[in-house]
Image (cartoon, coloured by chain):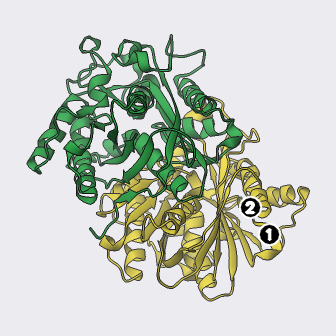
Chain colours: A green, B yellow
Amino acid sequence: MAKKQTIFFNNQPRIISSYSIAGPKEKYSVFAPYFDLVLKNDLWDCSSYEMTERKMLEHVIFNAIERAKLSPQDIDALICGDLLNQIISSSFAARKFDVTYIGLFGACSTMAESLAVGACLVDGGYFDKVACATASHFSSVERQFRMPLELGTQRPPTAQWTVTGGGCSIVSNKGVGPKITVATFGKVADYNVTDANNMGAAMAPAAMSTLLAHFENTKTTPDDYDLIVSGDLGKLGAEILVDLMEYHGYKLGQNYMDCGHCIYTNGQHTFMGGSGCGCSALMLNSYLIQKIREKEYKKVLFMATGALLSTTSSFQGESIPSIAHAIVIEN
Amino acid sequence: MAKKQTIFFNNQPRIISSYSIAGPKEKYSVFAPYFDLVLKNDLWDCSSYEMTERKMLEHVIFNAIERAKLSPQDIDALICGDLLNQIISSSFAARKFDVTYIGLFGACSTMAESLAVGACLVDGGYFDKVACATASHFSSVERQFRMPLELGTQRPPTAQWTVTGGGCSIVSNKGVGPKITVATFGKVADYNVTDANNMGAAMAPAAMSTLLAHFENTKTTPDDYDLIVSGDLGKLGAEILVDLMEYHGYKLGQNYMDCGHCIYTNGQHTFMGGSGCGCSALMLNSYLIQKIREKEYKKVLFMATGALLSTTSSFQGESIPSIAHAIVIEN
């Protein structure tokens, strides 16, 4: 491969601390016992859902830092993004911390994008400790991307439910914790899906593109991982990904899961499951990282997927370009 | 300093190629002879201003690559961002290139942010060649952030004019061209300015914060640079920055210029001057880089400034957090 989509980290930066937050609907997830904080209501004493999302992000960053027995002054950079226009949750959260700030946008792929960029910056010796974080809130995202909440618009069967949640990981060149050993950055894929209520179908080709590059560049197969996790393809998107990968000769078996597909239970009427950048951030920084720490999973391929649309692009008749970034976490 | 806001590049990545594009109003800039392409009209045969902005970005990326005598397949990563919601110009432009894509958001600081991140990734050996780019279009940005264009809303005296323009730099670990020797990433600063028509005042404290950190960490003074360039503070913002720096004991003299302040001529009725991420991108990738190549300026401190607001944050009564990222370019 002429192009180095995949990066191998010689110094293997470590995730020394993680913290997760979830909304009231997410309380009924089977993974809820692993969530660090579950909100009792949607607003959390804020005057708007956007303010709540920001407060959630501030909360996970602050608590991930504290859990690492550090203070914000010990963090060299905050690498952060979210779904709101101009990533205001991240930028306004960064205002609370006297820390270098690198703003990213990768839609729902942000958790993996921030960890991949953060791992590069720590591995290269540019920073000692960075905080990688993202969050989403159902109500802020839904009213920005789709319809006013008050309308109670009917959702089509392919729709997903934006997760109210978030997470932060502290990546460090020293300390104890699972290592980030490899990162595969994604390319934009667009198979001409135009339905903004069918994100799984739009994102599955990007997930396939990143997985194929990753397996080829690392000379690994799905069997080499205890767990392969995609972000928020949802039930339909995950099925499409399995089909696409099978077509290319890779079998995603029992060791494959999608955060969006499994975060909600069947009775929660979320149709294809969860979505939003908080979906994979919440799952990684709670259930997944704990199972990796406990060595139930020793080698995990974590790939967050993002649909790079805006309301403007959809109104102008555009299809939905997507991307997926992946990292390998080992313990 | 416990915190490493400033990074010194051992391998000194080079800017091997640059390309710039400008709109029809920018044709009357005194710097216009340095612009690579000046559009004859605002739409450039596109069906919307957003499509024009995207086409501009695609054009600068493609031509910067071609000017380096490379093909898109030789580029390891595209590091890109813009001002539109969900940075659609960047993501949709990335769709045109079969290249790894890292999406950023730093508002008008994007050119410096992408070069700083790109320089880290090249310096660290993670990528050989990256394309760093951004663009803005007056009409797409103005109608998104402020008012429908058809209203012809009166502009207050502190307003700036979003530059229709863009630029792309190819950063490489090999080849001929000016070197990026240092990067200072910014922290978010917010001095409680709430007027979205006075971005210069909002951004000046962020520019000050980054300059102070840069001078302190590099043990340099303004006199050590042939030129210190800020992005789009405009006339008022640049004056505030000079005052703030003087208060802190640094004199920004004849070797200081602001791209926003000087890009338009007095007769163009842009009040405080230009703004937008295309402003500093256009200036860097045309006039500035040529003067650096010709060694008229041997050591330049390039600092792009960004106001991290959204319409939602302003509607909710928030102030305007800002950021500035800086790089040193030497030849």
Which numbered disc covers residue B220? Answer: 1
In terms of secondary structure, where does tag 1 sit?
loop
The numbered mark 2 sits on a residue in which chain?
A: B
Can marks 1 and 2 be said to lie on one chain?
Answer: yes
Dot 2 alpha-carbon crowd within 10 angstroms: few under 14, some 14 to 19, many 20 or more: many
Where is mark 2, residue-wise?
B214
Q: Earlier in the sequence, mark 1 or mark 2?
A: 2
Work out how far the residue at label 1 is from the one at label 2, CA to CA, in angstroms: 8 Å
The amino acid sitting under disc 1 is Thr
Which residue is depicted at the point 40% across and 16% down?
A: A32
The amino acid sitting under disc 2 is His
Which residue is depicted at the point 31% across and 34% down?
A: A232
Rendering coords of residue A94 (x, y %): 63, 39
Instruction: Determine whether, in the image, residue A99 is placed left or right of residue A155.
Output: right
In depth, the one of A15 and A104 nearer the eye is A15
In terms of secondary structure, where does tag 2 sit?
helix
Which residue is depicted at the point 39% across and 63% down?
A: B77
Dot 1 alpha-carbon crowd within 10 angstroms: few under 14, some 14 to 19, many 20 or more: few
Q: Note whether residue B252 is visible.
A: yes
In depth, the one of A174 and B217 nearer the eye is A174
In depth, the one of B156 and A239 nearer the eye is A239
Q: Is residue B228 above or below residue A15?
A: below
Rendering coords of residue A162 (x, y %): 37, 26
Instruction: Determine whether, in the image, residue A228 is placed left or right of residue A149.
Output: left
* Circles 1 and 2: CB atoms closer than 8 Å: yes
